[in-house]
Image (cartoon, grey):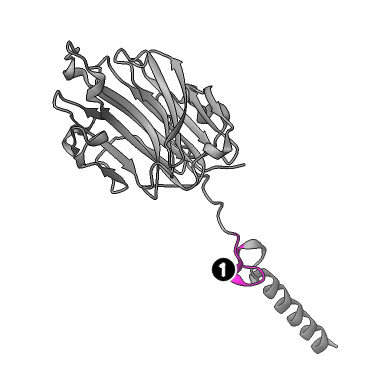
Amino acid sequence: MILIAGLLALALASTLVFVLVRPTGGDGGGGGADTAAAPPSPAPAEPEPLDGDETSAASLLDWGEPVYTETFDGDLGDEWQLYDGVGHGENGIRSPEAISVEDGLLTITGDEKGTTGGMALDVGQMYGRWEGRVQAPPTDETYNALLLLWPDAEDWPEGGEVDFMEMTDPTRQKTKFFLHYSEDDLKIEGEVLADATEWHNWAVEWTPEHIVAYLDGREWFRTEQTDALPPRPMHLTIQLDWFPEQGDEDPTNDVENSKMHVDWVRQYEYTP
């Protein structure tokens, strides 16, 4: 009897030891480290706020996260193609030397001989939204400052053209919109009054149903003429174009102020 009691005590002690050393909980139960609870993933970083965000169309209309952002805080990346050749309408020259990036600003300048600059963002898409923050001082009357969409296929005019900010007024008090379409280069246009010597946000939305232009988040141009909308993917370009025919016998000769400044640009996908 004493022997049996001793054996029962030994068995009970062995059981207690087993319970004490067995792994429990999420740090090893049921499969060891392979089934351990993973640490929570860090939340995605919020994009840094930019000057003018509070009046941007993207913020006010909730366009979501951009697929591309350029703040011009360093050297331009390979996705930017700087023009190097003849100017608009075979007039003047487009030179990379006319483009500079300094202190977080892109500047394009133009001189009295029509040497100026332009650049294209090699990130095309079918439909979408684009926005840029631009300022332009009063200028020689032969220079137009533009933000526009250009066809990826380089098949203008059939491929279309969307000039959602074209400053044709040398005092920079009026800005135009031009939608070019068809092989005959037909146009739909609009105009908004704004002091573009101050910083403003210029945006465009292109969908299968319409094109809308925004100034500081407020709609100022719209067309729902679907046969005039671009037929293929487009990309953003930034240009200071020279139009010598806009000059006269007594031009302003304010060439040193023939320039445009861009603080940032952003591109967004189309979401129905």
Residue at x 68% of width, y 75% of height: 18
Position of the C terminus, as image quadrant, is top right
| Residue 231 spot, x, y in % from top left | 50, 46
Residue at x 57% of width, y 29% of height: 61
| Residue 267 spot, x, y in % from top left | 44, 39
Residue at x 26% of width, y 34% of height: 89
Q: Residue furthest right?
A: 1
Which residues, given as a range, are shown in magenta?
27-37
Q: Is residue 120 left or right of residue 19?
A: left
Q: Which of the two residues, 135 or 2, is positioned nearer the viewer here?
A: 135
Q: Which of the two residues, 196 or 162, is positioned nearer the viewer here?
A: 162
Q: Which of the two residues, 250 or 12, is positioned nearer the viewer here?
A: 250
State the residue position of label 1: 33
Q: How many marks?
A: 1
Q: Quadrant of residue 73?
A: top left
CA neighbours of label 1 inside 10 A, class few (<14), some (14 to 19), many (20+): few
Q: Which element type, helix, strand or loop, lies under badge 1?
A: helix
Any part of residue 7 in sight: yes
Q: Amino acid at mark 1?
A: Ala
Residue at x 57% of width, y 32% of height: 62
Q: Is residue 87 left or right of residue 188?
A: left
| Residue 125 spot, x, y in % from top left | 46, 47
| Residue 235 spot, x, y in % from top left | 40, 43
Residue 245 lies, with reference to residue 157, above or below; the image says above
Q: Is residue 15 left or right of residue 245?
A: right
Does the segment drawn in magenta span residue 167? no
Q: Which of the two residues, 237 or 201, is positioned nearer the viewer here?
A: 237
